[in-house]
Image: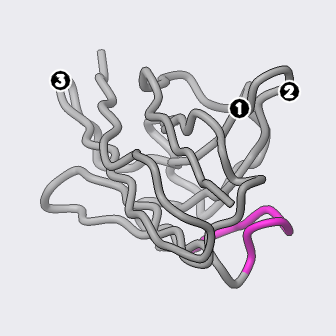
Amino acid sequence: QVQLVESGGGLVQAGGSLRLSCAASGRTYNNYAMGWFRQAPGKEREFVAAINWSTGSTRYADSVKGRFTISRDNAKNTVYLQMNSLKPEDTAVYYCAARPNEYTSFTYSLSYMYTHWGQGTQVTVSS
């Protein structure tokens, strides 16, 4: 089993930045598709960003394009989400997700394509 642990959330003022980390441990694989999702109170979970572990190809939700950057450190089995120019509407619990054994170059924006999820980290942006 793969365990995912998110960190880096917190409280920040609008216009500020945070960097989230997602560390994978346990049984690890050579190839993943990884994603970040978020869920605000009273709303459904939504896609934020995705990355293909082997190719580095990325995909972003329109709402975060130009502000958020997803990246990975293969040696550390860690995926990052750099969040800049944060807005109050970015407030949510952010979840990391993994799809192991991904030998294509695909990235995925649909939550059901992922098999492993972290517990989430709270991000609060004050106005």
Residue 40, horizontal then vertical, whole percent: 74, 32
Residue 17, horizontal then vertical, whole percent: 46, 71
- The part of the chain drawn in magenta is 57-65
> In the drawing, what numbered circle is on residue 39?
1
Q: Badge 3 local density, few (<14 within 10 Å), some, or many (20+)? A: few
Whether pointer 1 and pointer 2 mark residues with C-beta atoms closer than 8 Å, the reply is yes
Residue 5, horizontal then vertical, whole percent: 30, 31
Disc 1 element:
strand
For this rendering, which residue is in front, 70 or 30? 70
Viewport quadrant of the N terminus: top left
Whether pointer 3 and pointer 2 mark residues with C-beta atoms closer than 8 Å, the reply is no
Q: Name the residue under label 2.
A: 43
Q: Is residue 118 above or below residue 87?
A: above
For this rendering, which residue is in front, 85 or 105? 85
Amino acid type shown at disc 2? Lys
Q: Mark 3 points at which residue?
A: 26
